[in-house]
Image (spheres, coloured by chain):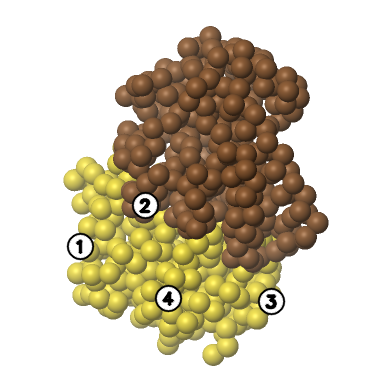
Chain colours: A brown, B yellow
Amino acid sequence: MTSSDRLSLNQATVKYADLATALSVTQEAGISSIGLWREPVADVGLRQAVAMVADSGLRVSSLCRGGFFTASDPALRSQALDENRRAIEEIAALAEAGAPGSAPVLVLVAGGLPEGDRDLAGARARAGDAVAELAIDAAGAGVVLAVEPMHPLYAADRGVVSTLGQALDLVEDLSPDVAGVVVDTFHVWWDPTLAEQLARAQGRIASYQVCDWITPFPGDALLSRGMMGAGHIDFAGITALVEKAGYTGDIEVEIFNQEIWNSDPLAVARRTVQAFGTTVGR
Amino acid sequence: MTSSDRLSLNQATVKYADLATALSVTQEAGISSIGLWREPVADVGLRQAVAMVADSGLRVSSLCRGGFFTASDPALRSQALDENRRAIEEIAALAEAGAPGSAPVLVLVAGGLPEGDRDLAGARARAGDAVAELAIDAAGAGVVLAVEPMHPLYAADRGVVSTLGQALDLVEDLSPDVAGVVVDTFHVWWDPTLAEQLARAQGRIASYQVCDWITPFPGDALLSRGMMGAGHIDFAGITALVEKAGYTGDIEVEIFNQEIWNSDPLAVARRTVQAFGTTVGR
């Protein structure tokens, strides 16, 4: 399989498309894999989504996303764990329905600091505890929990796991069959220890996602990602290190960007194929 | 000296005030130290600025800022080094004119990637080389070069030195008399290895700056800093680690925030005293 055969369109890149549209534009653009999100799956219901995925002939590269388990309130924490257990069941069914090579990978975003709470170390510890607790459910379902380090920009309000090193520490005591990490170029490209941490990630990378870091930084910090080639990231360099770490799975393009969201989804899928070919797939 | 006696008003917090106004509001608010910027000093000329500082009776805690030496073009690089040599002379004179306890510290911001350049490691190496080269001038002038790790948010366009660990690596081979690091809460608070790196920073902290990380993240990434207490940072925790690392100098409040800039500078200085007292100085 060449790099381009490994391209997967993450549904977030065509955020306004429903599941049927996302599946069809992926196929039409000649992409053989898709990264799913829970919300559009829930919109049609899991059973229907499973049938649609099976009909599409596409691989499923991951489900986004579980996590958000930093609450210190026991009731909220318990709710979050239950929600993650449902997500584990969903990705198990969706990956089973996908074409061979599908990956039963649930992407986990830790969540931010609880309201008014300044104890970052405490929130980080709770995130680690939650992953360890969910690993039992993941093992039962044959699912891999993929902890996603998020750019430090999001440490307060979205993801207290801020570096690849920290994510690797967090899964270290769990089997690689149930717990790994996500490498997303947007979140990790700046890290001076990236090469060293990717070397350490041998066998632990459960998902590889790409998009670019663009400047000037857009007004909305959540929508600051660009198509590969539009920004400052050296995709060839990072991809080589990811492959050296043993990752041979699909490579998801996941872009949160208002201009891309406002575009026709098929045009976006085709633009993705092209940009991928000249950067990551080169 | 209590923590509150160590408060220094960094001029960037009252950005629109000229040097005379910045000095007078600092005094009127009962603050005994000021962190200067090159531009307002240049507006009156160095000789006049030195006289004004001497008259004020204030300590000078640092000069912002040198750096911006990641250019790969030899002519641009040489220009940047010359500019930094002038900044070294300026802080030497200003600290000499300040009250006892003034610190001849030049804050250095590395600079971003050159236009179209995606070689982050290369830019980082050039930043390290430049600091080593300037260390000779700093030694001659009795000045400490203070390398400021900037939030990873700025890695592409302002500062390729992204973590305290990286800044410490960069100054490791130089004498602590001529090269240290800046710890700015805004830039480093998210770092999962912060406690460990601050322990390693023993005797290497040349400047400690505080301001808060606020959410939601404002439209302009450069103006996203808040008054202490307005955001998510645990100032007591970080300050304790900074003091444990042997830092007993002034603590600068440096806030880039449009609403604060639009306020009356004396009111801002008084607000700073109050916020400092209930957070850092507690």
| Residue B148: x %, y % from top left | 40, 62
Q: Is B113 in front, or is A247?
A: A247
What type is the residue that disc 3 sits on?
Thr
Which residue in the rendered view is the most extreme toward the top?
A28
Ranked by sequence position, the earlier of labels 1 and 3 is: 1
Ranked by sequence position, the earlier of labels 3 and 4 is: 4
Labels 2 and 4 within one chain: no
Q: In this rendering, which labeled residue sits more in front, label 2 or label 4?
A: 2
Real-space Cα separation, disc 4 to disc 1, in angstroms: 27 Å
Real-space Cα separation, disc 2 to disc 4, in angstroms: 24 Å
Say which residue label 3 marks.
Answer: B278
Say which residue label 2 marks.
Answer: A200
Sort mark 3 into few (<14), some (14-19) or many (20+) by Cα contacts within 10 Å: some
Q: In this rendering, which labeled residue sits more in front, label 4 or label 1?
A: 4
Residue at horizontal 73%, vertical 61%?
A72
Number of numbered callouts drawn: 4
Q: Quadrant of the C terminus of chain B?
A: bottom right
Subunit under mark 1: B
Say which residue label 4 marks.
Answer: B199
Subunit under mark 3: B
Residue at horizontal 31%, vertical 40%?
A244
Residue A169 vs A108, above or below: the answer is: below
Q: Is A51 in front, or is A165?
A: A51
Residue A240 vs B199, above or below: the answer is: above
Q: Is residue B61 left or right of residue A94?
A: left
Q: Is A171 in front, or is A155?
A: A171
| Residue B250: x %, y % from top left | 49, 79
Res. B133 mark: 1
* Cβ atoms under marks 4 and 1 closer than 8 Å: no
* Cβ atoms under marks 3 and 2 closer than 8 Å: no
What type is the residue that disc 1 sits on?
Glu
